Amino acid sequence: MDFRIFKQLPRLIYGLGSINRLPELLPDDINKKTVMIYDSAVEQVVTPQFSNSEKIILIPYNSEKSEPYTSEVAEIIEKYDDIWPDTKAIVGVGGGSTMDMAKGLSVALANGLNIDQLQGWDIPTKPGIYKIGIPTIFGSGSEASRTAVFHNGVKKQGVNSDYSMFDSIIIDPSLSATVPLEQKIYTAMDCYIHCVESLEGTYINQIASGYAEKALDYCDQYFADLQNDELIAVASYYGGVSIVNSEVGICHALSYGLSIEFGIRHGLANCIVFNVLEDYYGEYCSIFRAIIEKYKINLPRLFPDGIEPDVLDRMVKQTLLMERPLENALGSGWRDKLNREQIEQIYLKM
């Protein structure tokens, strides 16, 4: 397997309270401003520190209503059309959805295209506006990845490009202090799951393996008592570096169908899917279930009475679009190992 040149962020600030060091990462152009798009759930973190700055324009984003849509990128660009010519940097503060929104704005503005025209592999031809990611919940790996995922109304697909990677990030473990327990676990499990998929996949290489193994080690320590957010903060970054340089697998491919059809958030969708993938991930699924039971997390049973055929058909089609994750999981002959009927049967277990 031929791998891309190994990708890793050039600049990172880490530590408790390090969000205060944001100015150190901003470009020097004093005549331009910084746009900060932040998750409205963390307004109490953002506004006290940045609302009085004449050089920072704050844009709230409500990530709780859904995962990001391509139409939302276009709406924000149009609504704030007067600020972009004088923007030197875009900062995303929040969970994976908010950081993906920051990435999407950056590449869409720089390439002069709607974000749905950039979904796919290596489509942007110009570097995005300088962008900085500051996660406030840890596990998605968005801060380290080259992917920004969006719904376009029909399918869920990533903008996968070197140009959609952040130029700098800040990892401040203190920012997740107020996140609800279940949400923390679902997002941390996203890290656990995509590290498993990376390690068990055919795209794996020694460097990506090292990052994924250490991330899993930190996940194990974190899930022991959920007390040390520094562990999952670093695991999230390491896991993101791993999947940038390998790939996710079957779980992520199937989870997109749940998100498209039922609006289930990414972390929870992954947990629902991974719970029925013992045929593919064996002991890792047993470890996963033990953690879920330990913290009394009740995963919903989605289809106890079956599912409408047309809905199931759309979910299968969405899964089959995820060719790279499926090839990573099962090899170049994946179509001979995972057919439509097998995908349907996996969904019906949920």
Image (cartoon, rainbow, N blue to C red):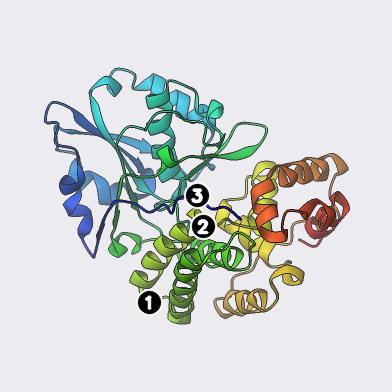
Please report whichever mark, 1 or 2, sits nearer to the chain's N-terminal start. 1
Where residue 292 sits: x, y (%)? 59, 74
* Residue denoted by label 3: 4
The residues tagged by marks 1 and 2 sit, at their Cα atoms, a distance apart of: 26 Å
Residue neighbourhood size for the residue with mark 1, other residues' Cα within 10 Å, grouped as few (<14), some (14–19), many (≥20): few
Residue neighbourhood size for the residue with mark 3, other residues' Cα within 10 Å, grouped as few (<14), some (14–19), many (≥20): few
Please report whichever mark, 1 or 3, sits nearer to the chain's N-terminal start. 3
Mark 1 or 2: in front is 2
Q: Secondary structure at mark 2?
A: helix
Mark yes or no: residue 265 visible: yes
* Residue denoted by label 1: 227
Where residue 13 sits: x, y (%)? 24, 57
Query: Residue at horizontal 78%, vertical 56%?
Result: 347
Please report whichever mark, 2 or 3, sits nearer to the chain's N-terminal start. 3
Q: Secondary structure at mark 1?
A: loop
* Residue denoted by label 2: 243
Label pair 2/3, CB-CB below 8 angstroms: no
Query: Residue at horizontal 50%, vertical 23%?
Result: 114
Q: Hey, what amino acid is under mark 1? A: Gln
Give above or below for 115 relative to 60. Answer: above
Q: Nearer the viewer, residue 42 or 222?
A: 222
Q: Nearer the viewer, residue 240 or 45?
A: 240
Q: Hey, what amino acid is under mark 3? A: Arg
Q: Quadrant of the C terminus?
A: bottom right
